[in-house]
Amino acid sequence: MKISETRDCEILSVLSQGVQELHVQLYPDYFKEYDYNVVKEFFESMVNNPNFIFLLLEDESRYFGYAMIEIKRYQENPFKKAYQSLYIHQFSIVDSYRKKGYGSKIMEKIEEIANAKKIRKLELDYWCANTIAKEFYRKCGFITCREFVYKII
């Protein structure tokens, strides 16, 4: 198993299909149906931004997971202190590779990147109905510090 940085928008687009379909299934009012070309254009618009890092999981020339992370710098304001984080925007492992430790390995790699950049905080969010993500992040040591709520009127 190998974890490497990538700029390959085609591979990222293909690997994002599973998580996009899960989001559509869980929250059809929010998420659009997967469209390879639209997703590829999105990744093409992001891969050269120096604040974004794309990681790829590979095993025997087969790609089976990825992560899209961003270096975020929050400015001080009258209410909050300044800080920076590595924000995990997207994280996905192909179903047949889950529960084999690969997610933990890519999370370790993300932590290595954060340490190398002297960033001490990892952040992410996930949709409440995505119990697989919730349990995985809990096992990785993430804690809830803020909740987002809404009301439809």
Image: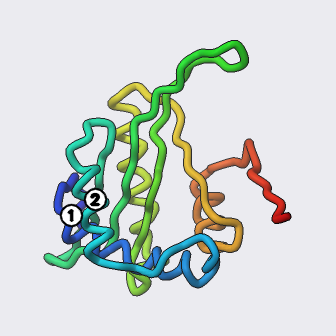
Q: Residue at point 39% right, 32% down? A: 115
Residue 122, how many percent across, how many down? Answer: 52, 41
Q: Residue at point 83% right, 60% down? A: 151
Of the pair 34 and 58, the residue shown nearer to us: 34
- Numbered badge on residue 93: none
Name the colouring of the figure. Answer: rainbow
Q: Image quadrant of residue 113?
A: top left
Q: Mark 2 or 1 closer to N-term?
A: 1
Is residue 94 found left or right of 12 in the rendered image? right
Is residue 125 found left or right of 72 in the rendered image? right
Q: Quadrant of the C terminus?
A: bottom right
Dot 1: within a 10 Å radius of its alpha carbon, few (fewer than 14), some, or many (20 or more) residues?
Answer: some
Q: Which element carries disc 2, helix, strand or loop? A: helix
Q: Residue at point 32% right, 43% down? A: 52
Amino acid type at circle 2 is: Phe
Q: Residue at point 29% right, 77% down? A: 36
Instruction: Check disc 2 and report the residue beneath it.
Output: 43
Of the pair 78 and 123, the residue shown nearer to us: 78
Amino acid type at circle 1 is: Cys
Of the pair 42 and 104, the residue shown nearer to us: 42
Instruction: Check disc 1 and report the residue beneath it.
Output: 9
Q: Quadrant of the N terminus?
A: bottom left
State the separation of the CA atoms marked 2 and 1.
6 Å
Residue 38, how many percent across, how many down? Answer: 31, 70
